[in-house]
Image (tube, rainbow, N blue to C red):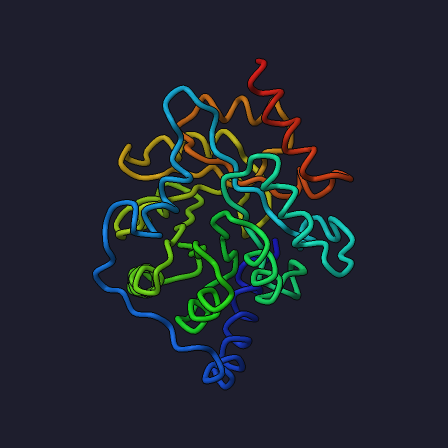
Amino acid sequence: MTDILTEIVARKRREVARRRRHARWLPPPPRRSDAPTGRADPRRRTIEALRRPEGALPRVIAEVKFRSPSAGQIRVHPPGEGPRVAAAYEAAGAAAVSVLADGPGFGGSVLEVRRVAAVVDLPVLFKEFVVDPVQVDFARAAGASLVLLLVRCLSQPELTGLVAEVRAQGMEPVVEAANAEELSRALATQAAIVGVNARDLRSFEVDLDRAARCLGAVPAGRVAVFMSGVRSTEIYARIAETRADAVLIGEGLMQHPDPGLALARLTSGARRR
């Protein structure tokens, strides 16, 4: 079976090498090795926005994604569609918005992240295959609050270094694992937000039960995010019975004619169950 993730990461490393030649045009990244605590700390506010209150449904990270290697085109992408969808998500009660920054595989861009961040008053997740600190610079310049880091793409020293880099630039890393071994590596970092992807990014096959079991090992002090595979009220209600603080939902919303309405119906339906 073709290893889709390996192909994507190899392409991403080539892209990063080219982008490094243009990094000098970015505004200088802020350095905050000793970020303040409490309500004044934007990282802390971001973490708490995703933490699930007792007795509530999981928070929703609603995703802006127009294409994927497994699904092909998910939604047409006319000018302004990303910000329009993100604003609809915010109105429907999303806790955060995830935006794909990869172009060839997912139809996203750094500019799309920036456009979305300009129209919503929510944490924005820079969802990219991050393999180099220059991509963290791009995330910060785009106005992101969160940066996705995939355990499977990185060595442990790379992962640890990127977690520190994201936090130093005033953002919060979301460290994503796909199995128990990767979760152990994620928990060995200082990341406060840890996700488990129900979709295997090597094959793009989805296993909800495996992800739910794995997510159960995330300690109570950290925010646990269930990622991928939530396409209905029934599945969302089922995930609500797990350890999940938050759920990332993309294709199941983006395929609907009105993604904001789809989100509102999904959550309201789960409340009635």
Q: Position of residue 77 (x, y in %)?
A: 75, 57
In the displayed structure, does residue 155 sit left or right of residue 23? left
Extreme-top residue of the structure: 273
Q: In the figure, residue 206 lies in which quadrant?
A: top right
In the displayed structure, does residue 259 sit left or right of residue 177? right
Residue at 62% x, 24% y is 233
Residue at 37% x, 48% y is 182
Residue at 25% x, 58% y is 35
Camera-side residue: 176 or 269?
A: 269
Vertical placement of 251 versus 231: above or below?
A: below
Vertical placement of 57 versus 10: above or below?
A: above
In the displayed structure, does residue 176 sit left or right of residue 232? left
In the displayed structure, does residue 160 sit left or right of residue 210? left
Q: Position of residue 188 (x, y in %)?
A: 25, 50
Question: In the rendered view of the protein, which quadrant contains the C terminus?
Answer: top right
Vertical placement of 186 versus 225: above or below?
A: below
Q: Position of residue 236 (x, y in %)?
A: 56, 27
Vertical placement of 79 versus 75: above or below?
A: below
Camera-side residue: 53 or 156?
A: 53
Q: How many marks?
A: 0
Extreme-front residue of the structure: 40
